[in-house]
Image (spheres, coloured by chain):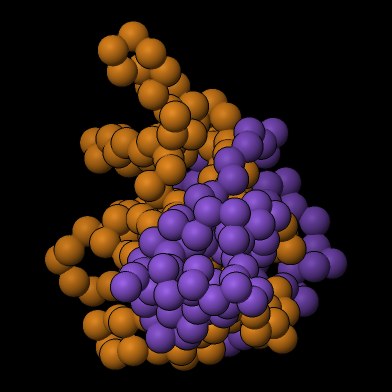
Chain colours: A orange, B purple
Amino acid sequence: MLFLGGEPFTSGGSKFLDQHPRFVEPTAKVFVKVAIPVFKGPLMAQVDTAAAYSTLETDVAESMGLFSRDEYPTLISTRLGTIRGQLLRLPLTLIAEEGTSLNVEATFFVSRQWRGPMFLGYTGLLDRLRIALDPLANMFFFGEGV
Amino acid sequence: MSRLAKLRADPEDEGLRVEEEIKSLLREGRIREAQDLLASAGDLVPSGSKLREILGPPRITVSDLKDVDRTPEYNWLNEHWVEHQGKWVAVVGDSLVASSSSLKSLLAQIDPLHFDRKPLIHHLI
């Protein structure tokens, strides 16, 4: 647990992956572990404060049977162009190795056209958490925002 | 006249009209405007509405779930990604336990298996 001004700031922490093999480029990426109920083990999601919305990887959405739903269609603009999809409310867990894990039920953008990884985006997810990075120890700390 | 003021001027099914207007904004990708309209709609959109849930903040609760230090799995991913590029992989410690071009197939492979620690599942695109 981290403290700020004597008060608890975060409640849990886990090691992150910052040299993700999918990206042969010099910019750093921070991937953290998440648990999604239907999967037998944790998956990696990229923490992206520049992403307007959280996005589910297409194969993951397919495995969860999410493409049979079409409740709130929308568009998002990506660096590869505009893609169509839908907004869905989904549960996941930010898994802690130290301290307390958090269940987070949040809105995700889901699209068959999406070719990227799972993003934990700013709006509607990270903007309600307290997060901190210790790059020297590769630790990602998180807690519920007040 | 604002978008909401126009909607309020119509006495019929104001709530439904507001919801349809918000959905229309979503279909156009104008998510922030949809959120703003919802925020200004007040009681026209009921508190239990699915729309409020979709456009609302996340719900956060404490979980008992715990995981172990995955440094061995991260090291494996960094060392072996070239030979498994494009595959979904399941890694336990410093060992690959399953690999497939589809997540569905990977999950079928690991489903009957038992592990001391849960496999880390990842896609090496």
Q: Nearer the viewer, residue A72 or A122?
A: A72
x, y percent for residue B9 = 49, 72
Percent from the top left, x then y, of residue A114?
A: 44, 84
Q: Quadrant of residue B106?
A: bottom right
Decide if residue A61 is on the left or right side of residue A44.
Answer: right
| Residue drawn at point x = 65 percent, y = 84 percent | A70
Q: Nearer the viewer, residue B122 or B16?
A: B16
Residue A135 versus residue A110: which sits nearer the camera? A110
Q: Quadrant of residue A121?
A: bottom left
**Residue nearest the viewer, comparing B35 with B84:** B35
Question: Image point 57% across, 30% down: which residue?
Answer: A100
Q: In the picture, which quadrant includes the N terminus of chain A? A: top left
* B57 relative to A39 in the view: left or right: left
Q: Percent x, y for residue A28?
A: 22, 58
Residue extending farthest to the top is A6
Please determine whether, in this image, residue A83 is positioned above or below residue B36: below
Q: Residue at x 32, y 36 (%)?
A: A132
Residue found at the far right of this picture: B112
* Position above or below: A123 against B90: above
**A94 over B55 or under it: above or below:** above
Q: Quadrant of the image for the C terminus of chain A? A: top left
**Viewed as shown, does residue B48 lie left or right of B74?**
right
Can residue B60 be seen in this snapshot? Answer: yes
